[in-house]
């Protein structure tokens, strides 16, 4: 994953996190708190290595914990473990298929809150859990599954635009052949 794509991923995750923590219309309509960060973790797991996964977990997870009432580190751990599980399976997943993106984001949307609850229980915090928690996990998984392919499409669009614009801006060319010719011209001018 390139730096512009990673920067775009982090910025979108931060904006979405801010919106979901301050915009309660969806929460009231579904009677569940919506968390779309597992979709971004799934994108980082499928299209990047451990660096983007750790970066997203650190930055976006800490941002979510600061904006919510979660203890610091809860979202960080759940995002990291969700992305790590998906990253371990990314060779067998068809990341370009819409149905596969739906199911990967559905699983990520279910893993995130489940891992957060398990982490809170492990810290002896005793979160409120019951049938409402199960409802929230199911609704969050479904919304992540539906929103996932759209978020993947937007991030892939930015990836192709940034890659093309960066190559054109820096080198004035797009293909490798043009880049090689450009480097030879620069060397001839210098020599």
Image (cartoon, grey):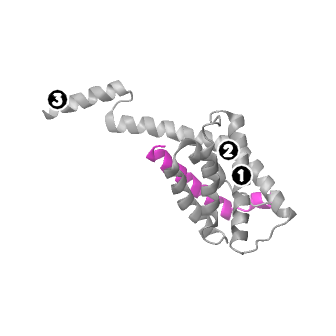
Q: Main secondary structure of the magenta part?
A: helix
- Residue 43 visible at all: no
- What's the residue at 36%, 38% (across, down)? 169
Position of 183 with respect to 153 (left or right) is left
The image shows residue 73, relative to residue 187, as above or below, that is below
Label whose residue precedes the other's in the sequence (2 or 1)? 1
Instruction: Give the farthest residue toward the left.
Output: 191
Rendered-image quadrant of the C terminus: top left
For disc 1, the marked residue is 109
Does the residue at mark 2 contact the one at mark 1 (Cβ under 8 Å)? yes
Report the mark closest to the observer, 3 or 1.
Answer: 1
Residue 17, image x, y percentages: 62, 59
Label total for image: 3
Distance from the alpha carbon under mark 3 to that under mark 2:
49 Å
Distance from the alpha carbon under mark 2 to that under mark 1:
9 Å
Q: Nearer the viewer, residue 126 or 38?
A: 126
Which region shows up in magenta? 1-29
């Amino acid at each position: 994953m390139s730096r512009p794509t990673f920067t775009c991923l982090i910025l979108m995750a931060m904006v979405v996190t801010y919106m979901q923590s301050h915009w309660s219309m969806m929460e009231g309509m579904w009677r569940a708190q919506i968390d779309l960060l597992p979709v971004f973790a799934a994108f980082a797991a499928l299209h990047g290595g451990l660096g983007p996964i750790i970066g997203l977990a650190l930055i976006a997870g800490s941002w979510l914990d600061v904006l919510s009432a979660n203890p610091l580190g809860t979202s960080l751990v759940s995002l990291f473990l969700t992305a790590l599980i998906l990253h371990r399976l990314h060779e067998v997943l068809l990341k370009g298929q819409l149905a596969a993106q739906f199911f990967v984001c559905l699983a990520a949307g279910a893993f995130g809150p489940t891992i957060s609850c398990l982490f809170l229980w492990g810290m002896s915090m005793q979160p409120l859990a019951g049938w409402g928690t199960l409802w929230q996990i199911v609704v969050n998984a479904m919304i992540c599954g539906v929103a996932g392919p759209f978020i993947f499409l937007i991030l892939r669009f930015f990836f192709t635009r940034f890659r093309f614009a960066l190559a054109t801006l820096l080198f004035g060319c797009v293909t490798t052949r043009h880049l090689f010719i450009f480097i030879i011209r620069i060397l001839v001018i210098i020599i």
